[in-house]
Image (tube, rainbow, N blue to C red):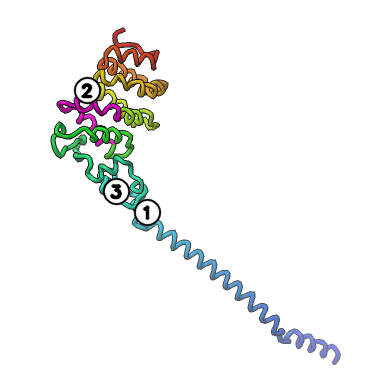
Amino acid sequence: MNVKCDSRRSNREAMQKPECPGGVQLRNRKAANGDQRTSSSVHRTTVQQSSSSSSTSSPETARKLHPRPSDKLNPKTINPFGEQSRAPSAFAAIYSKGGIPCRLVHGSVKHRLQWECPPENLPFDPLLITLAEGLRETRHPYTFVSKEGFRELLLVQGAAEKAVPLLPRLIPVLKAALVHLDDEVFARGLNALVQLSVVVGPSLNDHLKHLLTSLSKRLRDKKFKEPITSALQKLEQHGGSGSLIIIKSKIPTYCSICC
C-alpha cells in the first residue's frame, strides 16, 4: 500500500516538475515570431489600402475620370502635364501660340471662325499650307479650325492668284491627308481637294497623278465609292479635258461626266 502511494506521489511530482529553460525560450520565440508575422501582414494590408485610397482620390485621377468640357474645346485649357500635351502636333502648337489669325466661336447650333482681320488681307503663304496640315488632326478644336479655315481662305477674292504658286508645296500635304488611315481625316482631305480644284482649275492637273493613287485604293471601300466618284467628277469639271485623261490613266473604271 505504501509502495502504491509513493508511486502516485512520484508521478504527480514528475508532472508538476518545472519545464527546462530551453523549452520555455523556444516556445516564447515561436509565439513572438507568430505575433511579428501577424503584425507584418496587418501592416502590409493597411499600407496597400492606404495607397489604393490615395491613388483613386488624387486630383489627377479625378480629372482623368471626369474631364472638363472646356478641355476638349480650348487648347489653352488642356492640362499641361497630360499625355496629350507632351507631344503636340505642329498645327496644334501653332494654334495654341496664336499663329492662326482666327479664333473659334462656339454657337448654340454650330461653331464658326472669327478672323482677326479680313481673310482677303491675309497672306496665303504659309497660312494656307498650315491649315492644310491641320486637316490631319483628330482632336477638336483643331479639326474644325483647319477644315473651316482652309475653306474660307479659298473663298476670298483673288484666291486663285495666291493659291496656284503654292501648289507644289500644298499637294504633298493634301496627299498626306488622303493616305491617312482615319476615315474622317481622309474625308476632310477629299473635300479640301475639291475646294482647291474649284479655285485653281486646270492648274491642278499637273499634280493630280500624285493624288489619284490614294483615291483609287479608297474606292474599294464601299462607303467612300460615292463621295470619291463625286469628287472625281468635280475634278474633271474644273480641270477640263486634260484632267479626264489623267483620271482615266489612274482609275480606268471612272466614267466621265460627258458620257
**Residue on which disc 1 sits:** 61
Label 2 vs label 1: CA separation?
49 Å
| Residue 104 in sight here | no
Is 148 or 50 nearer to us in this picture? Answer: 148
The percent position of residue 180, horizontal first and vertical second, equals 38, 31
- Rate crowding at label 1 as few (under 14), some (14 to 19) or many (20 or more) other CA atoms within 10 Å: few
Amino acid at pointer 3 = Ile
Is 162 or 145 nearer to us in this picture? Answer: 162
Amino acid at pointer 1 = Thr
Label 2 vs label 3: CA separation?
36 Å
- Discs 2, 3 touching: Cβ within 8 Å: no
Is 211 or 18 nearer to us in this picture? Answer: 211
Rendered position, 53 above or below 7 = above
Q: Quadrant of residue 186?
A: top left
For marks 2 and 3 on the same chain, the one whose residue lies earlier in the sequence = 3
**Residue on which disc 3 sits:** 78
Q: Which is more foreground, mark 3 or mark 1?
A: 3
The percent position of residue 255, horizontal first and vertical second, equals 35, 11
The percent position of residue 63, horizontal first and vertical second, equals 33, 52
Rendered position, 228 above or below 28 = above
**Quadrant of image for the N terminus:** bottom right
Query: Which residues are drawn in magenta?
Result: 143-170
**Residue on which disc 2 sits:** 199
Q: Residue at point 35% right, 48% down?
A: 86
Rendered position, 47 above or below 64 = below
Q: Secondary structure at mark 3?
A: loop
Q: Secondary structure at mark 2?
A: helix
